[in-house]
Each structure stands twice: as structure tokens, then as C-alpha cells.
Image (cartoon, grey):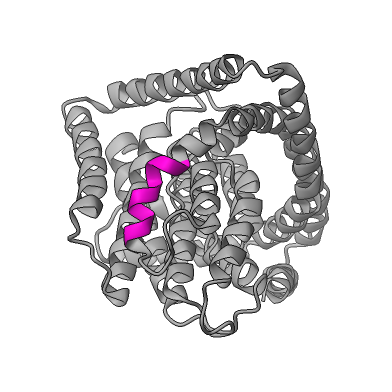
Amino acid sequence: MLALFWFFLIACGFFTALYRTIFERDLTLFSDLVDSLFKMSELGFEIALGLTGLMCLWLGLFKIAEASGLANLLAKALEPLLCRLMPSVPKGHPAVGAMTLNLGANMLGLDNAATPMGLKAMRALQSLNPSPTQASNPQILFLVLNTSSVTLLPITIFLYRAQQGAAEPTDLFVPIVLATSASTLVGLIVTGWVQRLPMLNPVVLAYLGGYTLLLSGLVYTLSSMDPSSMGLYSTFVGNFILMSLVMLFLVSGLYKRLDIYSLFISGAKQGFSVAVRIIPYLIAMLVAIGVFRASGALDMVMALFKSLCDALNMDSRFVDALPTAFMKPLSGSGARAMMIETMNHHGVDSFAGRLSAIMQGSTETTLYVLAVYFGSVGIRHIRHALVCGLIADLAGIVTAIIIAYWFFG
């Protein structure tokens, strides 16, 4: 599917340019297409190169957290909730620890570090699956929690914004937390309703109620601020939590008398390989999107949406960020490339640039996660997994648009 979509973008760009050359007599279009090929290739490499050091930093710190047992503390904190949402998984089963470590890495925004634990959790859940080719309820719920991707520290989004020259890379901290929380809560509620889970269980209500109360307090605090103050507050909270997290990782390592420097170096080496691995994927999608835009095809599609918004008397500024929303369920690298291209074209601190980043942080790549996680254990019948995941995606995207207007409108 992704290969066909990639070809579609390039072919659409080519034939749109050919059509405009013939009927509009514009002889510069193919020059623009070739120029876009070269520029997008360079941009992809530059972004990945700049990302290398930052990925090394966070994966190095995460290695210390794992070795010190800090990550396991998170697992123990979430275990009571997961055991009640997945009653068929025995308490203390290896799947519980793997799931919580995966969700913990997602909360920190370390999606690349989360994948290995996610695959391990899916294999552990498969050992409890009475029908090996059909997804079990715990596997579906775990997948939906991954695709809704509750991200409390969207580090990678901050890294991309910093790479693109944002004035305050972390000013989207609160908007992303609100958007990703909406997608996760909707995904959990919808899946719980389908699976008839005990959502009214006191322990479940305590977790969900506590988190909802925390978010409500945040929204209440923000509602009394003007847009500039909200941005300043979001920046302060994001930076304070990030630095506090760094100190917590280091102090936990020292408390356990670990060689935190060697552990950091070990984890940082993984960061280099991760950054190198994404170069081909990033360049491939940026090139296709660049050709699609340079031909005028993307502008034509966006013009249709803007015309619809104008007919309904709606503000159409959100339309410029929709390519990221459309790509998000299909491909992580594609959505990342769409976000970067939107930032590059409209400006990293523009409304569209900010909204595309909020959308990128609000959910995960549903079809990719479904294919990789279920494919790794040979599941062919996915039951209600895709529908629940896409509903969570939709909730995250709609919330992202609303919050972007609230903060930056």
C-alpha cells in the first residue's frame, strides 16, 4: 500500500505538471520538479544529520532509566490498570512488564525505543492467545493504546521543530499533551465498549478520573490566559519537565551506584543507528511530497478543501496542515515528512506548521503499527482493531485542530 501511495504522489506530480505545461504553456514546471527532487533530498539528509545528536542524547538517558529500574517503577505503577483492562492476562505475566515499558517509552516520545518492547509484549500476549491467527482482546487493546500513542513528552516533535529553527521548540508541549490525551481516552473508551471491559471498576475509574482531573486543571488554568501567556506557560512547563526528567534519570543511576557515563554512551550508540536508519525513508517521502507540491497538485487539492470551508463560512487555515493528518494513519515516515514539508513551506512557527506538529504528536501510525505488531506474531484476523484505532486517530486530529485555534488562533 505504501509503495503504491509513494508512486501515486510522484506520478500525480508528473502528470499534473505535464497537463499544466500543455494547457497553461508553463515551461518552468519540470524545472521546478527536478529542483524539488534535489532540494528535498538535501533537506532529508540535513534533518536526519541534525537529529543524530539529539537522538543519541535521549536514548542514552533512557538507557540509564532502564538500568536503574526507573522504567520498571513505571511498569509497577500501570500494572493495576492493565490487569483490570486485560482480565485474561495473569498478574505478573511478562506481557505486563513489556507493555508498560512500551507505553512508558511512548509517553516520553521515544517511539523508536518503544517498538522493540512493543513487539516483545505482542509476542508475550500471543502466548496467551487461544486462537493464534485471530487477534485477542488484550492484543487489540494494546494496539489501540499504541496507535492513540499517549505522549506526555513529545521529545521528537521538539527535536524536529528545533531543527527547523523554531523560536521556542517546546511551546507545543501543552497542546500536544491535550490532543494525544483525547485520542487515547477515546480509543480506550471505544475499545472498552466493544470488548465490554469493566470501565466502571473502581481502580479503572481512579486512574482515568485522576488523569482527567489533571487535564481539567490544566485546561482551567489555561482558560484564564491570553494566547501569548499560554504559549509562554507551555514553553516553561515543557522545558521544566524535560530538565527535571534528565536530573531524575541521572540521580536514579547514581543512587543505584551505576556507571551512568558508560550507560549513556551505550544508549547513545543506538541513537546514531536510529538516525541513520530513517534517512532513506525520510528522503523517499520528502522527494515524493516535494514533487507533488511543486507540480501544483497539492495546492489544487488544498484549494478544494478551502473552497468547501469558505462555502460553510469556516476558517480554512487548518487545511494547510491536513496532509499530515491524512498521512498519519498510513505511514509514520510519510507523516513526519509531511510535517517537515509543511514547516519548510509555511514556516515552522506558522499556524499550519504548528498544527501539523500537534497532529504529528497526537496519534501513532495505525496501519503501520497494526501491520508490524500483528504481522510479527502471524495474526491475520484483526477483528475490531482497525476501526477502534482509526476512531482514536480521528479524535486526536479533531482535537488538535480545536486546540491549535485556541492557542494560536
Can residue 395 be spotted in the picture? no
Residue nearest the viewer, comparing 284 with 343? 284
| Image-based side of 69 in relation to 90, left or right | right
Q: From this view, report whether residue 27 is shown above or below residue 135.
A: above
Residue drawn at x 52%, y 67% as measured from the top left: 301
Disc tally is 0
Instruction: Assign the C terminus to one quadrant of the image.
Output: top left
Residue 132 picture quarter:
bottom right
Q: From this view, report whether residue 59 is shown above or below residue 353.
A: above
Residue drawn at x 19%, y 33% as measured from the top left: 217
- Residue 394 in the image: x percent, y percent? 38, 63
The magenta region covers: 75-84
- Residue 300 in the image: x percent, y percent? 54, 65
Residue drawn at x 51%, y 78% as measured from the top left: 135
Residue nearest the viewer, comparing 56 with 60? 60
Residue nearest the viewer, comparing 409 with 30? 409
Instruction: Assign the N terminus to one quadrant of the image.
Output: bottom right
Residue 306 picture quarter:
bottom left
Can residue 72 be spotted in the picture? yes
- 83 drawn magenta: yes
- Residue 4 in the image: x percent, y percent? 71, 76
Instruction: Kindly report the secondary structure that dominates the magenta region of the rendered protein.
Output: helix
- 316 drawn magenta: no
Residue 241 picture quarter:
top left
- Residue 325 in the image: x percent, y percent? 48, 59
| Image-based side of 89 in relation to 246, left or right | left
Residue nearest the viewer, comparing 75 with 10? 75
Q: From this view, report whether residue 132 is shown above or below residue 141.
A: below
Residue drawn at x 60%, y 48% as measured from the top left: 114
